[in-house]
Amino acid sequence: MTPPDRRRRPLHRLLRFLRTYPRRSPLTLCYVVLLVISHYWFEDFLTPERADELRAYVSTNLDNLPDHPVRAMVGSALLYDGTLTDVTSPGFGGTLITLGIGVCGCLAWIERRWGSLRALGVFLGGHVLATLITAVVILLALGQGWYPEDVRSSYDYGISYGAQTVLAVAVLAVPRWARLPWAAFVVAWPLGGDGDWPGPLPEFTTVGHLVAATLGFALAAATAPARTARRAALAPNPRTVDRG
């Protein structure tokens, strides 16, 4: 049987994680607050017409990226496409994964381990690189007739590419036996939507999520040897025995 103290250990870790959250993950906390404020500003204070105009302006589509790439990238990272209250909505699952597990959990873990600036670099790097690579894929697909022309002006905004990247990096945070299931979850959830495949490729946002996951897994693989070496250096040498 598992000793009681070992059974309580995950709960103690969770409580310690929550208790130290503001101090050890201040950037993540501020970002979450900013996302919630921007969400309710769009939903409750702006008119639907004005909100749609702003969403169209910050969408990182082919029409906007050549015209105002920085404003589109930054504005897109300040919005999330989902709901916090309607738990029966299909969008709530995406919010739970991207904002809840991805940003609130995984980004906070990365900030604790690597610091605020590196955590910011991982999130924004995934957000920007996945967006740009997806734009290239869209251009190639348009040339082959795999996507309709109106994809150039489609809505494409939100935190999900950055969140997908940190979800993939967080494979380092789970036990070894859980890493394959975790990786399968990160790859599978974008494929579980109801979007149609317009051709040989899935819908372009699905492509973006898979690209972001690939970036995150690549970063995790690149940092894993250094992480293992650091743990080995900190571990006590079993051959060294203090005989008093």
Image (spheres, rainbow, N blue to C red):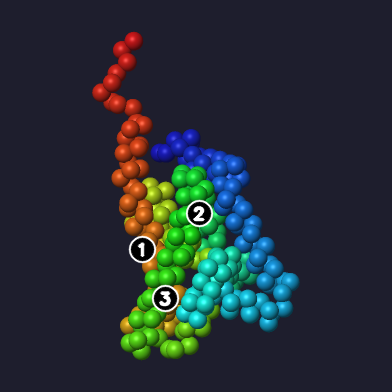
Spatial CA distance of label 3 from label 1 is 16 Å
Q: Residues within 10 Å of mark 1 (few under 14, many from 20)?
A: many
**Which secondary structure, mark 1?**
helix
Q: Give the image quarter of residue 122.
A: bottom left
Image height of 5 relative to 68, above or below: above
Q: How many labels sit on residues?
A: 3
Q: Residue shown at 28%/21% (left/top)?
A: 240
Image height of 3 relative to 191, above or below: above
Q: In this view, which residue lies farthest toward the top?
A: 244
Image height of 57 relative to 8, above or below: below
Identify the residue position indicated by label 3 in the image. 135
Give the mark nearer the N terminus: 3 vs 1.
3
Label 3–label 1 contact, CB within 8 A: no
Q: Residue shown at 67%/62% (left/top)?
A: 37
Spatial CA distance of label 2 from label 1 is 18 Å
Three-letter amino acid code at the position of disc 2: Leu
Question: Where residue 165 is drawn, which disc sits there?
Answer: none
Give the mark nearer the N terminus: 2 vs 1.
2
Q: Residues within 10 Å of mark 3 (few under 14, many from 20)?
A: many
Discs 3/1, front: 3
Q: Where is residue 190 shown, x and y percent of the image? A: 43, 70
In the picture provided, is 134 more to the left or to the right than 49? left
Three-letter amino acid code at the position of disc 3: Ala
Q: Where is residue 117 shown, x and y percent of the image? A: 50, 49
Identify the residue position indicated by label 2 in the image. 120
Identify the residue position indicated by label 1 in the image. 214
Label 3–label 2 contact, CB within 8 A: no
Q: Is residue 122 at least partly visible in the picture? A: yes
Discs 2/1, front: 2
Spatial CA distance of label 3 from label 2 is 22 Å
Three-letter amino acid code at the position of disc 1: Thr
